[in-house]
Amino acid sequence: MEELTAQRAEDRIGTVVDVLVEQAPGTDPADDIEVTGRAAHQAPEVDGECVVLDAGSVKVGELVRCEVVDSAGVDLVVRPVGADAAP
């Protein structure tokens, strides 16, 4: 089953998804927390998550439009696009 889910994640490379940010660094620049969230098709604790590259200063709860640039198993690796892209 995980192999099928990983293949579906790989098939999404190049598509655009809206990601709800669930984890982001706080105000301390020393925080070494990866920005992660979920796209609409990703259920908590069942599906993978989105790892957001070059996230800038996004906050938990924000919706960020991203392009899927890679996959890592069942997780999607995404980068913000358009107005959501970090300067």
Image: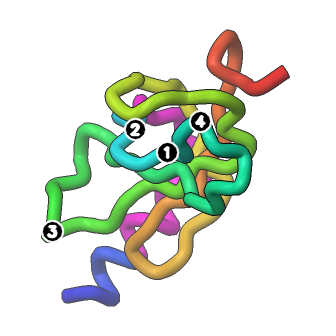
Q: Looking at the image, is mark 2 or mark 4 earlier in the sequence?
A: 2
Mark 1 against mark 3, which lies toward the viewer? Answer: 1
Asked if the residues shown at circle 2 and circle 4 are in contact, with their CB atoms under 8 angstroms apart, the answer is: no
Q: Looking at the image, is mark 1 or mark 3 earlier in the sequence?
A: 1
The amino acid marked with disc number 3 is: Glu
Q: CA distance from mark 2 to mark 4?
A: 16 Å
Percent x, y of residue 39: 33, 42
The amino acid marked with disc number 2 is: Val
- Queried whether the magenta region covers residue 10, the answer comes back as yes
Asked if the residues shown at circle 3 and circle 2 are in contact, with their CB atoms under 8 angstroms apart, the answer is: no
The amino acid marked with disc number 4 is: Thr
Q: Which mark is residue 27?
A: 4
What is the span of residues highlighted in magenta in the rendered image?
7-18
The amino acid marked with disc number 1 is: Ala
Q: Which residue is mark 3?
A: 45
Mark 4 against mark 1, which lies toward the viewer? Answer: 4
Q: Which residue is mark 1?
A: 24
Q: Secondary structure at mark 3?
A: loop
